[in-house]
Amino acid sequence: MISLFPTRPREVALLGAHCDDIAIGMGATLLSLLRAVPDLRVRALVLSGGGTPREAEERAALAAFCAGSDLEVTILDVPDGRSPAHWDRIKDALKDFRASCEPDVVFAPQRGDAHQDHRLLAELVPTEFRDHLTLGYEILKWETDTPRPTVYHPLDKSLLTAKSALLHEHYVSQVGRDWFDEAAFLGLARVRGVQCHAAYAETFTLEKAIINWE
């Protein structure tokens, strides 16, 4: 297995179409990252949920997943499931968000996501973050769109169980959904772990990277 050893990031950008996308897609990675870089700057943009009870869920959840970080969260009120109809607004919001931060790594939905809101965001992110390492996380859901990942983050089971506990604690509105349980979250992570010779893993698709030998 070939490993990539980048320098530790000082700032990351997190982008999600809905409240809970980021935590579901990469919650254990966030917990691991904050252990390694406790003073990390985290800038997050979520397209929908603003002005609803889901906004409070998202803010509390990201504060827990990114505990100790310099965290700023922006949550818009784009209607759930209607992102393509709000293309102009989302594009402008991304432009403003890009101007407000200078991340070493950008995390966003992966481009092959079948959900229209996720996919639109994934397609627009590289148009604003043109010179950034962008990693696309996968979101477990009803659609059969799990990607063929290119970047693996091996994780201890303790981080996955902590992720599941935080998801259940903070996203109470989602607990009744048939895909929202610890077996599903750990099951996908276990499959990804098998693929990189680890117990568990979260995975990402790599948008673009540059090799520099100096």
Image (spheres, helix red, strand yellow):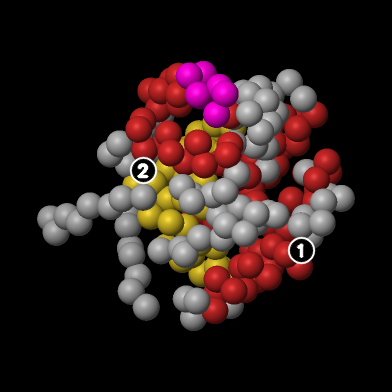
Identify which residue, 145 or 6, lies in the foreground. Answer: 145
Q: Residue at x 74, y 51 (%)?
A: 167
The prevailing secondary structure element of the residues shown in magenta is helix
Q: What residue did someone put label 2 on?
A: 104
Identify which residue, 138 or 41, lies in the foreground. Answer: 138
Image x and y of residue 21, in percent: 63, 44
Q: What residue did someone put label 1 on?
A: 182
Instruction: Indicate whether residue 79 is drawn in magenta.
Output: no
Secondary structure at badge 1 equals helix
Q: Residue at x 42, y 34 (%)?
A: 124
Image x and y of residue 20, in percent: 68, 43
Instruction: Reply above or below: 3 against 61.
Output: below
Residue 79 visible here: yes
Q: CA distance from mark 2 to mark 1?
A: 31 Å
Instruction: Reply above or below: 63 against 196.
Output: above
| Residue type marked 1 | Glu
User: What crowding class fits label 1: few (fewer than 14 Cα within 10 Å), some (14-19), or many (20 or more)?
Assistant: some
Image x and y of residue 158, in percent: 67, 68
- Magenta segment boundaries in residue numbering: 84-90
- The quarter of the rendered structure image containing the N terminus is bottom left
Chain-order first, disc 2 or disc 1: 2
Question: Could you say which quadrant of the image residue 74 lies in?
Answer: top right
Question: Could you say which quadrant of the image residue 67 lies in?
Answer: top right
Nearest to the eye among marks 2 and 1: give it: 1
